[in-house]
Image (cartoon, helix red, strand yellow):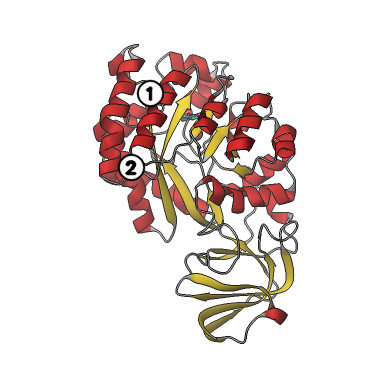
């Protein structure tokens, strides 16, 4: 059988849902053709390949390429000064209510050109790629007007043309109330639903729609309107839910068949049950939990018991998670949330793909999927979760290249 490339003499963590644990294979082989995996499994069981190129992995481990399913990678400026204010005692909510927070990033984002936004996001993207990232979700949400949200989404799409990485874009117009609306949040939601979502959909700029359902964000009723508008335009939804308080956003997300509900520190058991029933992925963001020094843990045991799939993401954003490492995210998932090594690795591969509606395309080493690989200089997969600030990536493969 002919193929383009073979990675031989490798240990595999296939993350196949049909195999126990990580789907570990000690003498493994991956073969690709036209950018897709045609075989991933034991070398002994492989068909006889005639490959244009064979790479000897010398016993290194291959995992699926890493996936970050929740980022706000596109933004102007930074919030290092607010970090100093917080160190001096101010809370995230106090800073937000005093006109800082998301609104200060909005101003910097509006002032930036599309080119500026791409240029400032690329180093963040490159840092993630250097750790084996092959797919990333990127949200808008710092433009907060039609013009600047479209600009942000175009910048996000551009990232996927400038690097060998798959980019999924999410429209997050309902992230914060822009100051020109005063306290007329319903008026802004009218704009989000009546103008912004239709325009974003018409230009094909977003793959999903998100909202920030929170006391400092939007109410469940407003979120419902955003979801209804998204659905009317054929766009799947997801939600920032139960991050700082419990507004029962996860159950609302479940009602709309959301891909994922994200954050979830304040999620209750009814929310867990609703997510389980609707198959909504719980995307946990330990970087934000760490950075805002949250003390309430997401209900991990209840999520597990209910069989809710758990994904992990950086939530890379300037305010609550200036984090560009999925390896550190995994370490935080284990250390702060007590996730197992297997859960952490699945969280940034298979379950992250599920959270983006991409499980048929990527996230595991299985024939038929895109050939997205991370090849590691490690002796056991636990090293990827155990270390902090060390990057053992040997090579990364995106779409067979
Ligand atoms: N939740 C978050 O943690 C970020 N956005 C959101 O909806 C915070 C964004 C920021 O502070 O800039
Ligand atoms: Fe977020």
| Quarter of the image that includes the N terminus | bottom right
Foreground residue among 31 and 58: 31
Q: Which mark is residue 67?
A: none
Instruction: For label 2, count other residues whose C-alpha is less than 10 Å away and answer few (under 14), some (14-19) or many (20+).
Output: many
Regarding mark 1 in the picture, which secondary structure is present there?
A: helix
Q: Residue at x 24, y 34 (%)?
A: 147
Separation of marks 1 and 2 at Cα, in angstroms: 18 Å
Instruction: For label 1, count other residues whose C-alpha is less than 10 Å away and answer few (under 14), some (14-19) or many (20+).
Output: many
Name above or below for residue 373 compared with residue 112.
below
Q: Residue at x 67, y 65 (%)?
A: 377
Say if disc 1 is inside 8 Å of ligand 1: no
Left/right of residue 276 with respect to residue 67 in the rendered view? right
Foreground residue among 288 and 77: 288
Q: Where is residue 325? Give x, y as percent.
A: 57, 47
Q: Which mark is residue 153?
A: 2
For the question of whether residue 284 can be seen, the reply is no
Q: Quadrant of residue 273?
A: top right
Q: Where is residue 232? Give x, y as percent.
A: 34, 35
Q: Which residue is mark 1?
A: 103
For the question of whether residue 311 can be seen, the reply is yes
Regarding mark 2 in the picture, which secondary structure is present there?
A: helix
Q: Residue at x 51, y 82 (%)?
A: 3
Left/right of residue 136 with respect to residue 289 in the rendered view? left
Lower sequence index among marks 1 and 2: 1
Contact (Cβ within 8 Å) of mark 1 with mark 2: no
Q: Where is residue 50? Give x, y as percent.
A: 55, 88
Left/right of residue 45 with respect to residue 260 in the rendered view? right
Say if disc 2 is inside 8 Å of ligand 2: no
Left/right of residue 222 with respect to residue 278 in the rendered view? left
């Amino acid at each position: 059988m002919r193929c383009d490339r073979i990675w031989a003499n490798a240990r595999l963590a296939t993350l196949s849902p049909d195999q126990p644990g990580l789907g570990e294979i000690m003498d493994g082989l991956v073969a690709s053709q036209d950018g897709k995996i045609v075989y991933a499994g034991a070398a002994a069981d492989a068909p006889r390949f005639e490959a244009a190129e064979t790479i000897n992995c010398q016993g290194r481990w291959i995992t699926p390429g890493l996936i970050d399913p929740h980022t706000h990678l596109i933004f102007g400026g930074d919030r290092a000064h607010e970090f100093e204010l917080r160190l001096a005692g101010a809370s995230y909510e106090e800073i937000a209510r005093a006109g800082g927070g998301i609104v200060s990033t909005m101003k910097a984002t509006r002032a930036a050109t599309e080119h500026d936004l791409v240029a400032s996001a690329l180093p963040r993207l490159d840092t993630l790629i250097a750790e084996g990232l092959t797919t990333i979700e990127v949200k808008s949400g710092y433009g907060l007007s039609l013009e600047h949200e479209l600009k942000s989404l175009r910048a996000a799409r551009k990232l996927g043309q400038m690097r060998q990485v798959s980019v999924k874009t999410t429209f997050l117009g309902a992230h914060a109330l822009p100051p020109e609306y005063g306290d007329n949040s319903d008026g802004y939601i009218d704009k989000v639903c009546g103008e912004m979502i239709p325009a974003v959909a018409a230009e094909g700029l977003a793959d999903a729609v998100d909202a920030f359902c929170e006391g400092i964000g939007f109410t469940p009723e407003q979120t419902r309107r955003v979801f209804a508008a998204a659905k009317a335009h054929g766009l799947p939804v997801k939600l920032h839910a139960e991050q700082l308080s419990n507004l029962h956003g996860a159950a609302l997300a479940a009602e709309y068949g959301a891909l994922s509900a994200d954050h979830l520190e304040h999620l209750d058991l009814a929310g867990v049950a609703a997510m389980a029933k609707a198959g909504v992925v719980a995307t946990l963001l330990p970087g934000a939990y760490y950075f805002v020094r949250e003390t309430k843990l997401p209900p991990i045991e209840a999520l597990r018991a209910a069989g809710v799939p758990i994904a992990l993401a950086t939530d890379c954003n300037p305010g609550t998670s200036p984090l560009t490492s999925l390896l550190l995210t995994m370490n935080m998932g284990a250390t702060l949330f007590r996730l197992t090594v297997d859960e952490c690795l699945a969280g940034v591969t298979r379950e992250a793909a599920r959270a983006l509606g991409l499980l048929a395309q990527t996230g595991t080493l299985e024939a038929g999927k895109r050939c997205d690989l991370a090849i590691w200089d490690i002796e056991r997969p636990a090293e990827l979760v155990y270390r902090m600030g060390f990057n053992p990536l040997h090579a990364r493969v995106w779409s067979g290249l």
